[in-house]
Image (cartoon, grey):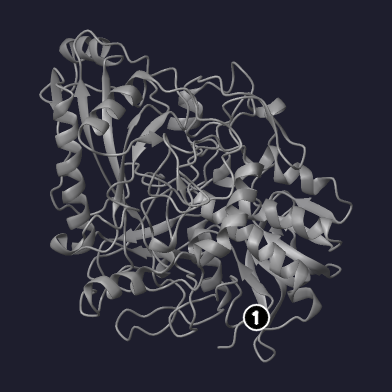
């Protein structure tokens, strides 16, 4: 069947999650003809996320209904170059979404403001510890952006997403109850924090006694009814316990499908095409620009070409990198020569946790939200925390609370309990409601030997090479995690639990099987030079001035915070630049 060529539009968007939805709304409202291509289907709260059907752990958690179908497209994985990479046949460590809304449908809602501690990491660490402090195989660098220029876009995303929280620094004045280490903000959060639960209260008391600074996790779980600036209506969080990996029945958890996407659909300039799988971005190499995309209608099997004046790559972190590799845009990264940029700076995160069991306490873990956590930032954004003795770049946060602790996947029992049989059943019944955990989340730094490329053996449903991930925790990651485990265990012990399973700080290889988070970063990272970055600080491709890449794939390293607040803010910043600058004079925005 011949490829059918369609009429050119001003912009084509690949993927309709948070970034795709933001760009769709902003550009179509500015008068541009915009087409968005999403490989998944459309969802609505009314049709897909109503009680009792939405509260189905088997359907959404175990069978992963809203996740990418690994039978059609997956990746291969290995820890080192010397190993054989094998296909991931069931998603485990991270969970890309596959529907309008993407991972924004099933996320927990954590929404943070990343600061110059990340954006100017190399400058800050070299300024404090000297140029020899960072090893040659650690690719951490400055991003080319600053917190000051991001602040208004953080605020815009927080108001779009109905974020609940407590400011810790208003216009330079530290506020009681918030994060004292956050950068200055002009406005308070749109909504007050979510109600604390017992685990939060116990952690907060222990952390305060230890000299730390606990505060409620900022989260896009609206603590009260709210209407955002685009007119989207939020219900107040019901603390139903079904948050992570679920849609929200009350529209209390912000999602693209009920915020930016409906706002975009109001414009006659916007068209959404679901079940549309983009297989390649088309490039005019001589002109250093892209001309559109090739995609397949999954319902009919027809291949179509969509020409466009601008292309916005807005899919999941790993899929962004995969499509760039398949399209042959920019040079793939080679760990031997250290040349090339696509696939470079891939990062994940570190985690450890202590589980505690309390005779006679009832935590009611089934009453929670994605944001029912209390956090300390003393070992992350706090520059007074001296990394020198630990010889690390980066940090970690610590938190406690409950988030979607459901009975099929969550059966906490003290260490030493039999793994099956009547004793196991007795223990799960006894301890399900009487346990809590303290966990850490740490950033990872880009490393020479952690990268993404095309697999030479395995292919997806279209016969294209799968993406291959080569990743393992490195010495910097191990040192961060070991320190986090020590601090987690000290706080956990101070609570005097009946039983405790301590957090582990032992070195271990990363595994794709147990879930950690969907906080993948890098692969098409931003920077100030085309020699070591795929996009400039405006997220514009160095090799094609009308191609813009959105999302966490543009992160130059991964931090301890969840990525979505920064992802949304960057999308709003790029949209402003497109509307006010690029369309008036298309071309490179930064000199190479």
Q: Is residue 524 above or below residue 227?
A: below
**Left or right of 119 on screen, residue 299:** right
Residue 512 in percent (x, y) is at: 32, 50
User: Which residue is depicted at the point 57% across and 38% down?
Assistant: 163
Residue 185 visible in the displayed image: yes
In this rendered view, identify the residue nearer to me: 479 or 128. 128
User: Which residue is depicted at the point 85% across and 45% down?
Assistant: 266
Residue 397 in percent (x, y) is at: 32, 45
Q: Is residue 153 above or below residue 500?
A: below
Residue 289 in percent (x, y) is at: 68, 82
Residue that numbered label 1 is attached to? 589
User: Which residue is depicted at the point 55% across and 32% down?
Assistant: 221
Q: Is residue 484 above or below residue 411?
A: below
Q: For the view shown, which residue lies furthest in the bottom direction?
A: 286
Residue 481 in percent (x, y) is at: 21, 50
Q: In the rendered image, which quarter is residue 491 located in?
A: top left
Residue 17 visible in the displayed image: no
Q: For the view shown, which residue lies furthest in the right direction?
A: 268
Q: Secondary structure at mark 1?
A: loop
Quarter of the picture containing the C terminus is: bottom right
Q: Is residue 501 above or below residue 301?
A: above
In this rendered view, identify the residue nearer to me: 226 or 351. 226
Quarter of the picture containing the N terminus is: bottom right
Q: In the rendered image, which quarter is residue 557 located in?
A: bottom left
Q: Residues within 10 Å of mark 1 (few under 14, many from 20)?
A: some
């Amino acid at each position: 069947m011949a490829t059918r060529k369609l009429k050119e539009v001003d912009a084509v968007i690949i993927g309709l999650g948070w970034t795709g939805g933001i760009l769709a709304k902003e550009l179509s409202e500015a008068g541009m003809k915009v087409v968005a291509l999403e490989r998944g289907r459309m969802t609505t709260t009314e049709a897909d996320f109503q009680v009792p059907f939405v509260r189905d752990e088997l359907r959404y958690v175990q069978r992963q209904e809203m996740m990418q179908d690994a039978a059609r497209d997956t990746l291969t994985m290995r820890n080192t170059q010397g190993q054989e990479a094998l296909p991931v046949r069931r998603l485990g460590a991270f969970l890309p979404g596959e529907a309008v809304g993407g991972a924004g449908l099933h996320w927990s809602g954590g929404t943070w403001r990343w600061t110059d501690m990340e954006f100017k990491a190399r400058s800050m660490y070299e300024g404090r510890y000297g140029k020899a402090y960072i090893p040659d195989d650690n690719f951490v660098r400055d991003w080319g952006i600053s917190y000051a220029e991001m602040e208004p876009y953080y605020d815009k995303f927080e108001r779009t997403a109905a974020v609940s929280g407590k400011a810790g620094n208003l216009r330079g004045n530290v506020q009681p109850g918030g994060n004292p280490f956050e950068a200055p903000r002009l406005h308070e959060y749109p909504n007050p924090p979510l109600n604390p639960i017992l685990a939060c209260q116990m952690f907060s008391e222990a952390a305060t006694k230890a000299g730390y600074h606990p505060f409620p996790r900022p989260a896009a779980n609206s603590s009260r009814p709210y209407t955002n600036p685009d007119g989207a209506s939020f219900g107040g969080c019901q603390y139903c316990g079904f948050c992570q990996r679920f849609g929200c029945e009350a529209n209390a958890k912000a999602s693209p499908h009920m915020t930016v996407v409906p706002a975009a659909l109001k414009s006659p300039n916007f068209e959404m095409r679901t079940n549309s799988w983009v297989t390649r971005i088309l490039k005019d190499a001589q002109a250093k620009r892209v001309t559109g995309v090739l995609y397949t209608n999954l319902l009919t099997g027809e291949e179509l070409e969509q020409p466009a004046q601008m292309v916005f790559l807005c899919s999941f972190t790993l899929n962004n990198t995969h499509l760039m590799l398949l399209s042959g845009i920019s040079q793939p990264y080679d760990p031997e020569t250290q040349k090339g940029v696509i696939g470079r700076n891939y990062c994940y995160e570190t985690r450890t946790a202590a589980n505690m069991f309390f005779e006679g306490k009832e935590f009611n873990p089934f009453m929670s939200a994605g944001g029912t956590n209390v956090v300390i930032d003393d070992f992350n954004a706090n520059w007074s925390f001296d990394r020198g003795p630990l010889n690390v770049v980066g940090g970690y946060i610590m938190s406690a609370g409950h988030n979607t602790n459901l009975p099929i996947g969550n059966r906490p029992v003290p260490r030493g309990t039999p793994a099956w049989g009547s004793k196991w059943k007795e223990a799960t019944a006894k301890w399900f409601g009487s346990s809590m955990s303290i966990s850490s989340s740490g950033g990872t730094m880009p490393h020479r030997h952690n990268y993404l490329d095309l697999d030479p053996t395995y292919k997806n449903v279209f016969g294209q090479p799968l993406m291959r991930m080569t990743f393992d925790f490195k010495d910097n990651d191990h040192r961060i995690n070991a320190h986090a485990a020590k601090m987690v265990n000290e706080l956990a012990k101070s609570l005097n639990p009946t039983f405790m399973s301590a957090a582990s700080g032992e070195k271990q290889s990363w595994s794709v099987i147990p879930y950690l988070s969907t906080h993948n970063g890098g692969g098409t990272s931003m920077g100030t030079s085309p020699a070591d970055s795929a996009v400039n600080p405006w997220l514009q491709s160095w090799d094609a001035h009308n191609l813009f890449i959105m999302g966490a794939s543009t992160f130059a390293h991964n931090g301890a915070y969840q990525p979505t607040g920064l992802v949304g803010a960057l999308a709003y910043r790029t949209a402003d630049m497109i509307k006010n600058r690029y369309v008036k004079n298309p071309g490179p925005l930064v000199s190479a």
